[in-house]
Image (tube, rainbow, N blue to C red):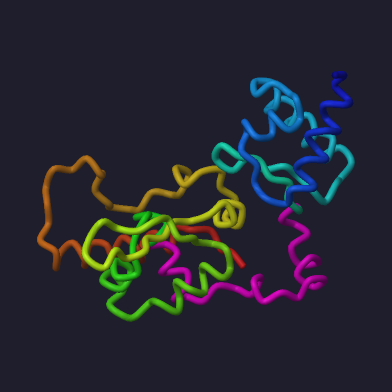
Amino acid sequence: MEIKEKLGAVEAILFASGEPIELYRLSEASGVDVGTLPSLIRLLNERYDDYGSGITIKKLESSYQMCSREEFAPQIRAALETKKNTPLSNAAMEVLTIIAYNQPVSKSFVENVRGVDSSSVVNNLVEKGLVEEAGRLDVPGRPIVYRTTSVFLRTFGLSSVSELPPIPGRETENCETEMLPEFAAEEEAAAAAAAEAALPDAE
């Protein structure tokens, strides 16, 4: 298969999918070796840049997705006029921050940190595609836990949750000191507020 054909196959698959595609699936579907795909995608993006294209291919952890460029967001919103593109409220940003930095977490965890009922906010974030269900806890009642999605990564311009900005003053996860529950909740609330301030703005 010639390089032009490989580029065309990868581009067509990403365009038709509309969703993030795992690297190995993209390799199987296109017939292109896994080790070659990153360089081909980089070449496609270089071509898009040269042409001033309105699309780009983003890496989202171990997946790739064809997306519109951020600078054209206002025009796209005007064309689609979709509810999902409305700005996030302060409460939504707070809940999203708590989930992003502690995932996977249950609604009760979020509510313990915030001190208020957060069910509707979590449900709204699920509706927007920013968080998703990630199984259930093995405790009485088996509550659902939530994690962020590839839409979250794309919205905030991240390739992985490991790129989230650090929370100022937060102790490392390897710290052996355990806090009492009431103080742990206060620490999580302070961390959430600091993290919310650190996250880039999103609509």
In the rendered image, residue 123, in percent from the top left (x then y), is placed at 48, 73
Identify which residue is drawn at 69% across, 21% down: 33
In the rendered image, residue 5, in percent from the top left (x then y), is placed at 88, 26
Residue 57 location, quadrant:
top right
Question: Looking at the image, which is closer to me, 98 or 125?
Answer: 125
Location of residue 176 with respect to 80 vertically, above or below: above
Residue 139 location, quadrant:
bottom left
Q: Is residue 77 left or right of residue 157?
A: right
Q: Is residue 54 left or right of residue 167?
A: right
Identify which residue is drawn at 33% across, 53% down: 168
Location of residue 41 with respect to 185 vertically, above or below: above
Question: From which residue to which does the magenta span run?
Answer: 69-98
Q: Is residue 108 left or right of residue 5?
A: left
Quadrant location of the N terminus in the rendered image? top right
Identify which residue is drawn at 73% across, 51% down: 18
Question: Looking at the image, which is closer to me, 79 or 75?
Answer: 79
Location of residue 69 with respect to 93 vertically, above or below: above
Question: Looking at the image, which is closer to me, 112 or 165?
Answer: 112
User: Is 70 contained in the magenta span?
Assistant: yes
Identify which residue is drawn at 56% across, 70% down: 127
User: Is 88 contained in the magenta span?
Assistant: yes
In the rendered image, residue 196, in percent from the top left (x then y), is placed at 43, 63
Location of residue 181 with respect to 21 vertically, above or below: below
In the rendered image, residue 184, in percent from the top left (x then y), is placed at 18, 61
